[in-house]
Amino acid sequence: MKLATLKDETRDGCLTVVSRNLKFAIKADDIAPTLQAALDDWDYISPLLTTRYEELNALPSSRAFEFDTAQCMAPLPRAFQWLGSAAYLSHAERARKARGAELTEDMRRDPIMYQAASDAFVGARDDLCFDSDETGIDIEAAIAVITGDVPAGIKRERAGEHVLLVMLANDVKLRELVTADLARGYGLLHGKPVSSFSPCVVTPDELGAAWDGRRLHRPLAVHVNDTLLGRPDAGTNMDFSFPRLIAHAAGTRSLRAGSIIGSGSVANRDAAVGVTCLAEKRALEIIESGEARTPFLKFGDRVKIEMLDGDGNTIFGAIDQAVSSTGARAKPNASPEAE
């Protein structure tokens, strides 16, 4: 099943069922007004949404309409919890090596995880807006899962049962501010401004063999200004699986339905497949030549993050965003009719 949230001038948008090929959609607010409402009562709501999804794929009804990803908010426009992590150790290893440091044993033993802002996310086709482009604007293309209720202390062997939905994420960082945040010892704040997500979320069964209950085994393509930055496989070299990440997050506290767990920047140990964030490319350049040549993003740059299935069809829809000045920001969550 594929779901999206359409803009409707409210904070949480309208829950919508999307066809498998992302061509058509039909509103589902008569079943549950929002995705969070569906997650809150998933065992009852999910079968009703699945029935509508099957009907939409078989024969679109008169209520169906063409699906336009530009009209999508983030699937969860705001969430109770958004936890980012560093599940691919090769990414962290390269970043540290460029600084003349190494990963510590505890970083290899337990996932690195932080709590990011979750009160307002950015839609997949909405601009990334900043006051300045001199702060090291960077992308981190990642896989994210949305959980149901997860009890505190859950073991990793059972944690994967609580993955309800899967999506793509652009876990944006402001690299020039990250260092100052970390130096204060309390984690990221100014260096972690916004996050955006793919137009659609999908249930794990929709991914077929690509989802093994622990990892998503498909290449993740990232382009900056139409130039390929990398296409690493999300299931390869993911040192901490999603069940491991969920168990770590719930080590001392329960997670509520609608919690988002991110993988961090997807990375493979084979540098030939490229990277999914600019900081890692710069790290590789420093390791090779002693100098970073790749610039961070500037106003006017464009980023595209997408995953295709084995037949070349988009799975989640693309995150396709321009970087722009805050002064050019449109009214948040506004529909075209309201602008």
Image (cartoon, rainbow, N blue to C red):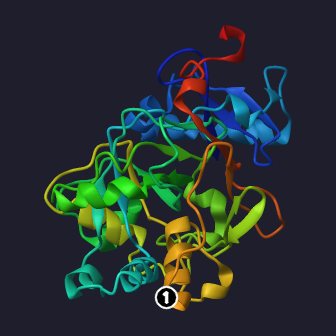
Front position in the image: 240 or 330: 330
Residue 107 shown left or right of residue 302 in the figure: left
Residue 325 location, x and y as percent? Answer: 57, 33
Q: Residue at x 74, y 67 (%)?
A: 228
Residue 169 shown left or right of residue 227 in the figure: left
Q: Disc 1 residue type? A: Ile
Q: Is residue 301 above or below residue 114?
A: above
Tell me if I can see residue 267 in this picture: yes
Q: Label 1 crowding class (10 Å Cα cut-off): few <14, some 14-19, many 20+? A: some
Please, what secondary structure does the residue beneath circle 1 have? helix
Front position in the image: 282 or 104: 282
**Which quadrant of the view contains residue 65?**
top right
- Classify the position of the C terminus by image quarter: top right
Q: Residue at x 78, y 70 (%)?
A: 310
Residue 111 location, x and y as percent? Answer: 29, 72
Tell me if I can see residue 166 in this picture: no
Residue that carries the numbered disc 1 in the rendered image: 287
